[in-house]
Image: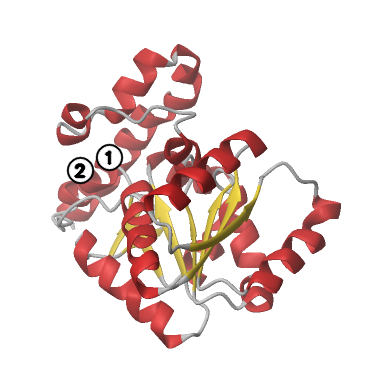
Amino acid sequence: MVEILGVTFCELTEDEVFAACTDYIASGAPHVIITAGPEFVMRLQREPSLFELTRRADLVTPDGIGIVLAAKWRGRPLPERVTGVELALRLLAAAAGHQWRVYLLGASETSLQGALEALRVRYPELLIQGRNGYFKAAEEADVVAAIQAFRPDLLLVGLGQPRQDVFIDRYRDQLAVPLAMGVGGTIDIISGTVERAPVWAQRMKVEWLYRLVREPKRLRRQLVLPQFAFAAWREGRALRRK
């Protein structure tokens, strides 16, 4: 495990995390995975109470090249990024073959239905249902009841961070889903509502730059990235000096 700015990340490859996921689902007991990038880590610096979410999770994966670089600065390099979208896509493919029941929670109704349709076309044998992410706190009981009624083996929640992780943590025991994971905008990507960065950008680890060019309004949100880089570098330097 590698701790970066108070968040403990697993030192596993994507293949190893995927293997752990299949074990979690086979166990039948509730498990939670958080995929955390620099923006989420910096959000925790402003809201320390959210650190408890990461401590209760079974795994926290490095979702972003910034996390990988920060680990390197600490002298504890991570093997690779393990992103929510890649992990979710692998789990969905596996779900079809293993007859896992999957529930998608999040995105707009249009995007959700588009994702469900796309997945049913790609995997006709997939057992899947879902609900959009536009619900108020007073409606959470109904959302939880719907998930319970479906009895999923895999719950993918795309409500954005930290809302998705707060929801999963709050209802972890009540839902008792073998594997629950926040997936950010993955539902939008599956539906085609949001275009994923091209392969070259993924390989060069500059998806953030591609999205910024395509969506300039993300600039304010991504200003946190240099803040994270400086804080992580400073922390790594202090540890090396010790």
- The disc label shown at residue 69, or none: 2
Q: Which residue lies furthest to the right in this view?
A: 138
Image quadrant in which you'd find residue 169: bottom right
Residue 15, given in percent of the width and then of the height, sits at 20, 64
Residue 210, given in percent of the width and then of the height, sits at 30, 21
| Viewer-closest of 55 and 25 | 25
- Identify which residue is drawn at 56% across, 74% down: 177
Residue that mark 1 sits on: 66
| Viewer-closest of 130 and 233 | 130
Residues at discs 2 and 1 in contact (Cβ within 8 Å): yes
- Identify which residue is drawn at 34% across, 75% down: 22
Residue 30 appears in the rendering: yes
Can you say which quadrant of the picture contains the N terminus?
bottom left
Three-letter amino acid code at the position of disc 2? Leu
Q: Distance between the residues labelled 2 and 1?
A: 5 Å
Residue 241, given in percent of the width and then of the height, sits at 16, 52
- Identify which residue is drawn at 62% across, 49% down: 163
Q: Is residue 156 above or below residue 147?
A: above
Q: In this view, does 171 lie above or below 69?
A: below
Which structural element holds mark 1?
Answer: helix
Q: In this view, does 137 lie above or below 27?
A: above
Compared across the picture, whether 219 is left or right of 163 comes to left
Three-letter amino acid code at the position of disc 1? Gly
Image quadrant in which you'd find residue 6: bottom left
